[in-house]
Amino acid sequence: MPGPPPVPTMPSVPPPPTGATAAATVTEARPPQVKLAAVLLVGAAVAVFLGVYGRVHDGTGEAVDVLFFSNQIRMKVWLATLAALLVIAQLASALRLYGKVGSGSSPAWLGDVHRLSGTVAFVVSLPVAFHCLWSLGFKASPGVDRVFVHSVLGCLFYGAFATKVLAVRSSGLPALVLPVVGGVLFASLVGVWLTSAFWYFDRAGLHL
């Protein structure tokens, strides 16, 4: 006699995502406009926070460590110069990676150089930003002058940096986001350098 009919089995259903997996799934499911707004808001919040802190904090006038430089100002202008050179290198490598300059495919190592130059530029800028905010504070004298513009551009640089870091890690954003944010990042740091290091070198010369 034939045996009993097979018992139908339910199709296997994967378990619902939890924890970080669920967060990543929700993030990827967001519309591009929402993700773009979130990325821009975080960058703006970083810039505003730094500006507000520098404004309400009374500068101590002290230096934590000037490394091998003779004083705080010279340490700041030379580190800012190094950061600016690294960002120029990052811009040049980005243009090559995206095929805007040169011909043929870019070298395999260029992507690592691009990321490393950006990381080192950020790290080098931290002692400068720390002494600007903690030791000097945000200068908001009446009218628009060099120091005020320098302070605003410094806050804008870190806001743009935070925006770029998030944009690189967010898929589905408009193609123009990274070039625009990268351009703002580059322009703000060049502006910071022009209103500080260049201004100082023009008057005091190239001294350590």
Image: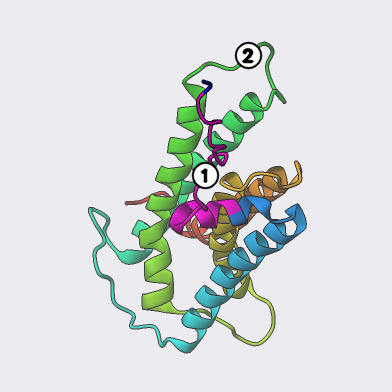
Q: Are marks 2 and 1 in contact (CB under 8 Å)?
A: no
Residue 139 percent coordinates (x, y): 54, 80
Q: Amino acid at mark 2?
A: Ser
The disc label shown at residue 14, or none: 1
Report the residue at 53% width, 21% height from top.
Answer: 2
Rendering quarter of residue 204? bottom left
Residue occupying image coordinates x 43% and y 70%: 132
**Amino acid tagged 1:** Pro
Farthest residue, direction front: 1
- Check disc 1 and report its element: helix, strand or loop: loop
Q: How far across and how far down the image is residue 102, in percent?
A: 68, 17
Label 2 packing within 10 angstroms: few (<14), some (14-19), many (20+):
few
According to the picture, the residue beneath numbered tag 2 turns out to be 105
In the rendered view, tell whether residue 7 sits above or below residue 70.
Answer: above
- Left or right, residue 208 beside residue 143: left
Give the residues in magenta. Answer: 3-25
Mark 1 crowd level (few <14, some 14–19, many ≥20, 10 Å Cα): few
Mostly what secondary structure, the magenta segment? loop
The answer to which of 144 and 45 lies nearer the viewer is 45
Residue drawn at point x = 54 percent, y = 69 percent: 46
Q: Given this view, does label 2 or label 1 mark the residue nearer the observer? A: 1
Q: How is the image coloured?
A: rainbow
Q: Quadrant of residue 178?
A: top right
- Residue 16 in the magenta stretch? The answer is yes
